[in-house]
Amino acid sequence: MTGDGLTHALIEAEFAGLTRYERISLATPVRIGIVGLGQRALQHLKCLWSIPEAQIVSLCDPFPENLEEGKLQSYVEGFELRDIRTFTQFDEMLAAGNLDAVYFCIPPNRHNGEVIACAAAGLALFVEKPVSLYFDEAVEMEKAIGAAGVIACVGFNQRHVPNHEGIRDFLQDKRLVMATIVSNGTLESHSVKHTRTEDLDGPGNRVWAASAAWSGTTVVEAGIHQLDTMRYWAGDVDWVRADYVHRDDDDIEDGGDNPYAYSVTFGFAGGLVFNLLLSRLRKTFYGDGYNDLMWDHGHLKIEAGAPVAYYYEGPYPPETNPSVEQLRHQVPVPDQGRDGTHHINECFVRAVASNDETLMRNTFRSSMNSHAAVLAANASDQLGGEKIDLNAFLYDDTYARFRAKPSN
Ligand SMILES: NC(=O)c1ccc[n+]([C@@H]2O[C@H](COP(=O)([O-])OP(=O)(O)OC[C@H]3O[C@@H](n4cnc5c(N)ncnc54)[C@H](O)[C@@H]3O)[C@@H](O)[C@H]2O)c1
């Protein structure tokens, strides 16, 4: 087991031994504010409401309807506003103080210095992915977080999904060579969001994840999950190459202009080549997917929701070729049934309570490689499928226009 894996195991053992009551009495409550009370924040609020060490103190959303107790209760059983303060202006929430940590769950094109202001105020940060649509803006956030020395993570809950942890442990001593993930989604499967995009020059139907200006493309908004999970298994990305099939103008409705399909190749520092194939067709309604991970002497797939590896262990060469049954191995999965979103919240709250970032599975800084890789995929597509070295993407003037946030 690597250092990271060992740390995870030790943390789990340490907390598993405690009763809920013992955990409450040991914990220093972490005072939390949430900015953006939409789809994702409601999921976090539900988790945080059941985590004893977490104390919700402030909620902020520009649209008062998203702060109404009745609406929040319909998503979070037993929720009560009581002493929780609500704000429609972020500046007022920050000025009111009484916070240890702030969650940002706003559309990625809506950031406007708030993360930086929180870091400067010494607050811990949980920022939903993607943390921005622009690399320069993410760098400014990272600098502020680093300068303040605050605990900060990005909402990569997939690292906390039991199957993914089992796969990570299984792959630790393997030489990964190629991985392929196919995710065929549909425009209709996008959720209707809580941001009043119709009041913000956005899509009239509030499905902002289908809009390039709001989501930064499906690779940036959704594919970053698969890419970051691959990084959890395989380390950092070195280069990117991408080709998208762009949507016909007469097939765009309600601002849903993201491409039909995406073919992205991520080259990892360890030699792995990862193919990510995504689609978002309209008038289709049915989606499916496929996952395959190869190492030099075997491959792993998700079958019926569980990871299964195919490899040979006997003397080589065998007298007769082994059967599929002999090659098929169920990959052990820890903590079956654990919810990834709940667990990332627990880890973050504990990290803040003990000022120990090693209790988390990512930090803001460690997530920058995932962010850079998906933004570089967009750049590669715009440059006709150019192979982009990530270091060059970060530092060379050639790519400056792909990193910059357009001025208003
Ligand atoms: N980790 C995951 O699995 C996961 C799942 C869904 C969404 N997300 C991410 O979470 C973020 C939010 O997505 P969502 O689905 O909750 O969207 P949403 O539109 O449902 O919710 C966003 C909320 O933010 C509010 N808001 C908008 N601008 C704001 C601002 N400037 N200040 C304060 N509040 C503001 C909106 O009114 C809305 O209530 C996105 O970055 C998205 O990619 C992550």
Image (cartoon, rainbow, N blue to C red):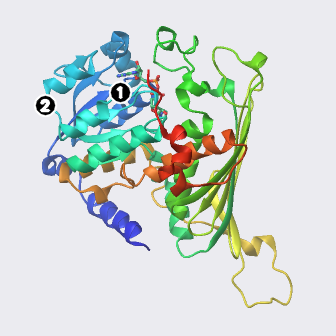
Q: Secondary structure at mark 1?
A: loop
Whether ligand 1 has any atom under 8 Å from the Cβ at mark 2 is answered as no
Q: Residue at x 23, y 53 (%)?
A: 19
Q: CA distance from mark 1 to mark 2?
A: 22 Å
Q: Tell me if mark 2 has few (under 14), some (14-19) or many (20+) residues whose alpha carbon lies within 10 angstroms of its own.
A: few
Where residue 94 sits: x, y (%)?
A: 19, 27
Disc 2 marks a residue whose amino acid type is Asn
* Vertical relation: 329 (above or below) 103: below
For the N terminus, the image quarter is bottom left
As shown in the figure, which amino acid type bears the numbered disc 1?
Asn
- Which of pointers 1 and 2 indicates the residue nearer the eye? 1
Q: Quadrant of residue 122?
A: top left
Horizontal side of 379 relative to 69 (left or right) equals: right
- CB of mark 1 near ligand 1 (< 8 Å): yes
**83 and 89: which is toward the camera:** 89
Image coordinates for residue 245, horizontal then vertical, percent: 76, 35
The answer to which quarter of the image holds residue 111 is top left
Q: Label 1: which residue?
A: 112
Q: Of all residues shown, which one is farthest toward the right?
A: 320
